[in-house]
Image (spheres, rainbow, N blue to C red):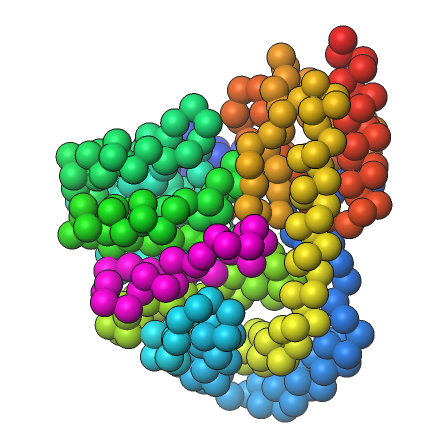
Amino acid sequence: MTSLDDLPLRPELRGRTPYGAPQVPATHRLNTNENPHPLPDELLADLGTALGHAALELNRYPDRDALDLRADLAAYLSRTAGTQVEQPQVWAANGSNEVLQQILQAFGGAGRTALGFTPSYSMHPIISAGTGTGWVDGHRRADFTIDAAAAVAQVREVAPDVVFVTSPNNPTGTAVPLETIEELYAATSGMVVVDEAYAEFARTGTPSALTLVPGRPRLIVSRTMSKAFGMAGLRLGYLAADAAVVDALQLVRLPYHLSSLTQAAARAALAHTDALLATVDAVRAQRDRIVAELPAMGLTSVPSDANFVLFGRFADAPAAWQALLDRGVLVRDVGLPGWLRVTAGTAAETDAFLTALGEVVRDQR
Ligand code: PMP
């Protein structure tokens, strides 16, 4: 058997393991922050029609610039994010992971550095490695909030080319105040990427960093249809920024990267935005219910603006993870000692999770 060590692999990739939650079978899969609510019937019908039309043209390459889709995304952001966003300011790719990769291809790369405040989305350092970008861990407080003064000092000292701010943060659910983002922007001459994959789940009054984009050409806000829109299988991520940033990304994107089927499906889904986002309130209610139930079990959680909850503290989090799995509930061990992360989904899933967790806590005593 050939091993990776037998191949002329780039040295910085040696010894690494691929990203990914364990895909183990479980009755309740609460480990990847998907939206478990089924797509509305009227959307499913429209998807069939839209994909049928797109299929008639599959002998042709797709719209390379995805102009109609970007216009629809700009309209969605303008309607919901408290600021006007125009089509030339929006870019889309196969999941926000690809958006982030294109950002690092354009603004990171060999000899350049990215900084992100860990623990955060683990793909940020992985995509950095994949694009040859150096990585620096930014500091957080013990409660997982970002100390703005300390963060600014670290950014000044490291002078990264790209600063990642995940808000709400994965895996902690922590929202980052806009003032902190403004201060970080002012402290760097590099790009600032605010990863807002979970923005739609934020508690009311938590504003989007999109409102900071006007007048800040180095600020990028990335979003996705994988979470609140409930379309993780579609693979559609996007960003809003100054139009010049979109011009920069055109230099690194592969031609025709977004298939015509993806573009058609995403547009059909966006035409049903209100019906799709109708589940967001229900998911938020389950998140808040999980948070409210934990103290009675002697557990705690990190305040969450996302569709998941980081909960603990366990003497042995991997053992608690396994005990939950033994009861059919798959959560995520993100490698933070004492903590586990659970996705908030349907009421029935929350019931199953809380029942299983109660048993696990009792058994561990
Ligand atoms: N950003 C964050 C913070 C995430 O948690 C995720 C998904 N886990 C992504 C980006 C990527 O999502 P996608 O590629 O599905 O858009």
Q: Position of residue 281 (x, y in %)?
A: 68, 57
Please report the residue visible at 55 percent of the width from the left and 32 percent of the height from the top: 302
> Can residue 136 be seen?
no
Judge by depth and name the residue closer to the eye, 303 or 113: 303
Quadrant position of residue 160: top left
134 relative to 343 in the view: left or right: left
**Foreground residue, 235 or 182?**
182
Q: Quadrant of residue 290?
A: top right
Verify whether residue 125 appears in magenta.
Answer: no
Q: Quadrant of the N terminus?
A: top right
Magenta highlight on residue 221: yes
Above or below — where is 91 with respect to 226? Answer: below
- How far from the left and from the top, in percent, is residue 338? 58, 19
Q: In the rendering, at what x and y percent does residue 106 appear? A: 26, 60
Which residue range is magenta in the image?
199-223
Q: Position of residue 207 (x, y in %)?
A: 45, 57
Q: Nearer the viewer, residue 75 or 322?
A: 75
Left or right of 47, for residue 362:
right
Q: Quadrant where the C terminus lies?
A: top right
Is 302 situated above or below 270? above
Please tell me which residue is depicted at 70% across the width and 65% down the height of the picture: 278
Q: Residue at x 25, y 55 (%)?
A: 191
Q: Work out whether residue 285 can be spotted.
A: yes
In the orientation shown, which residue stands out farthest toward the front?
205
Q: Is residue 67 left or right of residue 305?
A: left
